[in-house]
């Protein structure tokens, strides 16, 4: 089980010869594979085609395409603001990747490679933090670092300044918030990188007389370099396409990036500029495809460095002596910054009648009225219900589908490599772009899908296919092929073998896949924000709207309630994964 | 019984270049025999076994069990594995971890469609099979609580429950530790003889093959290079490959002036002198012929000691001596060529001493194949 499908080496196409063999293989494809390929194409082709068309055709007010034009691209490249925003995107992505990677590396090394006390809790905490909606996370940092936040209050007092000392609505604010938001994910992936390097390399280094710092620098870090580099690109891509932080932090400070440009051309221009959004999306997608291709090449190199062998492989902790209390302190500090403060401030804000920073005076005002208001509101209940349905439906569609695809592909059924490729394809769509692409499709469909919960579920399903695929694949790979062959030899047909042997054995990884997809799909905003209608409000989008309306305390109360609910889900996820010895990385 | 002819299966590796496989294997099993496919990894033995099981589809050839074609590339017959009535023990044992010992062994009786068994029948057969392998006391255990050896026994019991016509064993002992391996080896042979099931055994371990088999087919690079009883394979190898793969051996190249008759001795001229060699088959006179002598078939004496008449004789100098407990190994330099000698009898000689080696002509085997 892993949190990043992009980390997948996948079936890399080695040579043209192999391609030909694979294409020829499609002529003798097995029927179930053909059906599944068809199914995936139904979901993947229309948004792709409509997205391309939208950037090349003018759109009538009712959403149908009109005339061919290159105008949108010309406008895009003719506008100096486009290049300014592209540059912003890059700076922002590099910065947050650097923040996430340096904190994540330190954390992963402490947890995987040392005997620091408390290190085992980092996993649990990282997984729980997966359940916090990005919007809420970003908002919590705005509350901490904003004009009336405690940090500014402290600095104003220290510097004796009448005006706020720092302005979070800036590039560095975006970088810090996004970077810290990515730390748990970075940690989970990096711990896999560190975990897969044999500790005996480090022991050999120590035996040769190198100290801990020198060993970390010359051996641990060197061995992990390809993995780190691949991860750097990955976080870069994710930050590059991310929407929540730029929308909440960047936009108020007039710092735009490509993903917010797309949003604005649809939301803030009347009528919506579909063509411009399409052209923006195409550019963003092209960049992401390029980066992912680079990433794939690097992660293949990283695989070479992974030294998991059967015998003698034992990741072992390094004894830090009394320094381990320092590293434990670091872990606690990181916990406070990454989880403690953000969650604390949101809980605090949820208990106030209005948010005005952290003051003694406001402590007297503490009240539960926000919760009463939230629980009494019908729209909140609707949103909770919708979100639970959304998460459950997405996970229930993604997991069985990817389990079958992963199994067929791992067992080399004829043509199943295509399932693998198709199910991974949605990765090239940045979340907001996927929202745009499906928006075009739903606008043109006659059944009135637009604005319905079903439409949000469908987009979610496609968006999280790669994540489900990655997780199912890991489960299937753990299954020794001979277990199935023994069943066949015993006289069982394929369906019997799948039901009585394969399914029971991959059940634990299916359950974790389900919970994982559930957690991811309920916290996202970007893919859904353009699609939800009054009937299909979901929590993450509700939070986004509440912030934009300035309803900070209601937002906080809603957020805390939701976090509590998700903490239960993610704890179950963690316990199941641990119970069955599934790697959570 | 089982007959395999012209079996051909070539793998294509990832980059599209042709890889290993089996390139034309022919053999026929006798009722109730234990037949071994022996060879180094990648020789095609496992491919052959998996083709018989139906786990691989060969490209050419024919596999017949009894009077029924299991696979025939000409008529297009390819019986799916679940209809082949074959029992198989896998290298990893493939014991299903989510089932108990009983459920594992009962599975073939429950899922097979050809014959339906009543509940009582299933229970009786499973008990019988588990008792036979000595797991009767573990019947309700979760299978994850079994040791390696017990899993191995369970795998055997599972293969036996359906009373298959043919039992396939894919390196079944390779995951056990050395002591347990020897014990299981003899037990396996006992079970096979008791049940009378015809079995094919795949291994890369030559001593295992010699100990357990009725007949051995030695494979190399996708072909069967020699087929025969263990003692023939050992004592009368037909090729350098077999001579080297099975046991250790001394190899000499020579030249023969006359044609040789089968099962007779003939003189071969070698750089070390003329040697009388045994020819397992007829051979034409040729420039280059290889001769092998097993290290344990050579007698070593201090130079000048009395020796039997008629034996081949070489003189040399002792280079090294290794005492291994039950035997002693000597390395002797004979005119620049090293000879290995193994004997249980320690000789009163030391490095640097002149020694005489002698070996009987019938132990000096000419290799008919190059």
Image: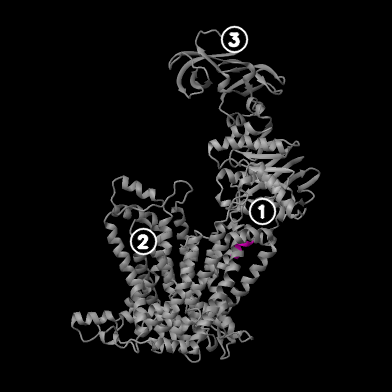
Per the model, the C-alpha gap separating discs 1 and 2 is: 42 Å
Residues flagged by tags 3 and 2 on a common chain: no
Visible in this render: residue B51? Answer: no
Question: Residue at horizontal 71%, vertical 36%?
Answer: B194
Residue corresponding to mark 3:
B308
Per the model, the C-alpha gap separating discs 3 and 1 is: 61 Å
Which residue lies most toward the left here? Answer: A160
**Colouring used for the render:** one colour
Q: Using the image, determine if residue A505 lies above or below residue A44.
A: above
Task: For the residues labelled 1 and 2, say whether their Cβ atoms are less than 8 Å apart.
Answer: no
Residue corresponding to mark 2:
A119
Question: Residue at horizontal 52%, vertical 8%?
Answer: B305
| Label 2 neighbour load within 10 Å: few <14, some 14-19, many 20+ | some
The numbered mark 2 sits on a residue in which chain? A
The question of residue A263 being in magenta is answered with: no
> Where does the image place residue B299, in percent across and percent down from the top left?
55, 16
Q: Using the image, determine if residue B119 lies above or below residue B209.
A: below
> Where does the image place residue B147, in percent across and percent down from the top left?
55, 46
The circle drawn on residue A77 is none
The circle drawn on residue A487 is 1
State which region is magenta: A414-419
Per the model, the C-alpha gap separating discs 3 and 2 is: 78 Å
> Where does the image place residue B242, in percent across and percent down from the top left?
62, 31
Mark 2 secondary-structure assignment:
loop
Residues flagged by tags 1 and 2 on a common chain: yes
> Where does the image place residue A27, in percent across and percent down from the top left?
69, 61
């Amino acid at each position: 089980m892993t949190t990043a499908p992009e980390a997948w080496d996948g079936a890399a196409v080695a040579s043209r010869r192999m391609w030909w063999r694979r294409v020829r293989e499609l002529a003798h494809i097995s029927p179930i594979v053909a059906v599944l390929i068809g199914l995936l194409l139904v979901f993947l082709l229309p948004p792709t085609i409509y997205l391309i068309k939208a950037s090349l055709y003018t759109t009538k007010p009712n959403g149908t395409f009109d005339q061919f034009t290159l105008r949108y691209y010309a406008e895009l490249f003719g506008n100096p603001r486009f290049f300014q925003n592209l540059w912003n995107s890059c700076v922002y992505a590099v910065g947050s990747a650097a923040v996430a990677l340096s904190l994540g590396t330190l954390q992963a090394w402490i947890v995987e490679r040392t005997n620091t006390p408390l290190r085992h809790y980092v996993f649990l905490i990282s997984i729980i933090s997966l359940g916090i909606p990005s919007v809420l996370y970003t908002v919590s940092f705005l509350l901490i670092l904003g004009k009336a936040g405690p940090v500014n209050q402290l600095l104003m007092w220290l510097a004796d300044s009448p005006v706020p000392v720092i302005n979070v609505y800036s590039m560095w604010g975006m970088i810090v918030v996004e970077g810290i938001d990515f730390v748990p994910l970075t940690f989970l992936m990096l711990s896999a990188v560190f975990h897969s390097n044999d500790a005996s390399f480090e022991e050999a280094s120590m035996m040769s007389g190198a100290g801990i710092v020198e060993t970390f620098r010359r051996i641990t870090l060197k061995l992990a370099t390809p993995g780190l580099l691949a991860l750097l690109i990955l976080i870069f891509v994710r930050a590059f396409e991310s929407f929540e932080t730029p929308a909440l932090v960047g936009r108020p400070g007039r710092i735009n990036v490509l993903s917010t440009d797309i949003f604005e051309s649809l939301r803030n221009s009347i009528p919506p500029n579909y063509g411009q959004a399409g052209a923006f999306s195409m550019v963003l997608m092209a960049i992401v495809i390029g980066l992912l291709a680079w990433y794939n090449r690097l992660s293949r190199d990283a695989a070479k460095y992974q030294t998991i062998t059967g015998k003698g492989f034992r990741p072992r902790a390094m004894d830090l002596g009394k320094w381990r209390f320092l590293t434990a302190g670091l872990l606690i500090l990181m916990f406070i910054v990454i989880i403690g403060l953000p969650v604390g401030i949101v809980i605090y804000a949820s208990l106030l009648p209005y948010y005005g920073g952290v003051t003694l005076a406001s402590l007297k005002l503490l009240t539960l009225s926000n919760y009463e208001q939230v629980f009494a509101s019908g729209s909140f209940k609707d949103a909770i219900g919708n979100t639970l349905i959304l998460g459950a439906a997405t996970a229930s569609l993604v997991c069985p589908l990817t389990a079958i695809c992963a199994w067929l592909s791992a067992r080399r059924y004829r043509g199943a490599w295509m399932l693998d490729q198709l199910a991974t394809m949605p990765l090239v769509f940045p979340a907001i772009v996927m929202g745009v692409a499906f928006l075009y499709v739903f606008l043109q469909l006659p059944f009135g899908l637009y604005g319905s919960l079903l439409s949000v579920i469908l987009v979610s399903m496609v968006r999280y296919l790669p994540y489900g695929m990655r997780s199912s694949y890991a489960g299937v790979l753990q299954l020794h092929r001979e277990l199935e062959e023994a069943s066949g030899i015993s006289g069982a047909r394929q369906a019997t073998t799948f039901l009585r042997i394969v399914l029971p054995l991959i059940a634990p990884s299916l359950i974790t896949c389900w919970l994982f997809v559930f957690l991811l799909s309920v916290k996202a905003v970007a893919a859904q924000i353009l699609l939800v209608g009054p009937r299909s409000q979901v929590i993450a989008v509700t939070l986004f709207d509440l912030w934009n309306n300035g309803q900070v305390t209601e937002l906080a109360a809603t957020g805390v309630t939701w976090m509590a609910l998700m903490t239960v889900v993610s704890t179950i996820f963690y316990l199941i994964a641990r119970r069955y010895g599934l790697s959570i990385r | 019984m089982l007959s395999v002819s012209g079996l051909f299966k070539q793998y294509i590796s990832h980059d599209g270049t042709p890889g290993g496989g089996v390139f034309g294997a022919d053999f026929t099993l006798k009722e109730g025999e234990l037949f071994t496919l022996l060879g180094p990894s990648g020789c095609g033995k496992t491919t052959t076994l998996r083709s018989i099981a139906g786990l691989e589809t060969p490209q050419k050839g024919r596999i017949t069990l009894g009077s029924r074609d299991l696979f025939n590339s000409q008529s297009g017959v390819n019986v799916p594995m679940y209809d082949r009535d074959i029992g198989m023990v896998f290298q990893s044992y493939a014991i299903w971890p989510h089932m108990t010992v009983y459920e594992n062994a009962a599975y073939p009786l429950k899922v097979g469609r050809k014959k339906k068994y009543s509940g009582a029948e299933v229970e009786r057969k499973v008990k019988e099979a588990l008792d036979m392998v000595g797991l009767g006391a573990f019947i309700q255990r979760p299978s994850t609580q079994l040791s390696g050896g017990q899993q191995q026994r369970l795998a055997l019991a599972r293969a036996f429950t359906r009373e298959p016509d043919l039992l396939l064993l894919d390196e079944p002992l390779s995951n056990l530790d050395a002591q347990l391996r020897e014990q299981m080896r003899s037990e396996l042979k006992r079970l096979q003889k008791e049940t009378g099931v015809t079995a094919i055994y795949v291994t890369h371990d030559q001593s295992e093959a010699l100990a357990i088999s009725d007949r051995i087919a030695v494979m190399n690079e996708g072909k069967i290079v020699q087929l025969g009883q263990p003692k023939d394979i050992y004592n009368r190898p037909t090729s350098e490959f077999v001579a080297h793969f099975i046991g250790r051996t001394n190899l000499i190249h020579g030249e023969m002036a006359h044609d040789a008759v089968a099962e007779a001795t003939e003189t071969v001229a070698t750089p070390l002198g003329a040697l009388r060699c045994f020819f397992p088959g007829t051979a034409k006179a040729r420039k280059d012929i290889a001769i092998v002598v097993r290290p344990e078939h050579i007698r070593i004496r201090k130079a000048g000691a009395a020796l039997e008449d008629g034996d081949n004789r070489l003189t040399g100098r002792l280079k090294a001596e290794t005492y291994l407990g039950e035997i002693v190994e000597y390395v002797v330099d004979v005119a620049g060529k090293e000879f290995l000698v193994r004997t249980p009898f320690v000789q009163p000689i030391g490095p640097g001493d002149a020694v005489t080696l002698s070996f009987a002509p019938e132990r000096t085997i000419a290799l008919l194949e190059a």
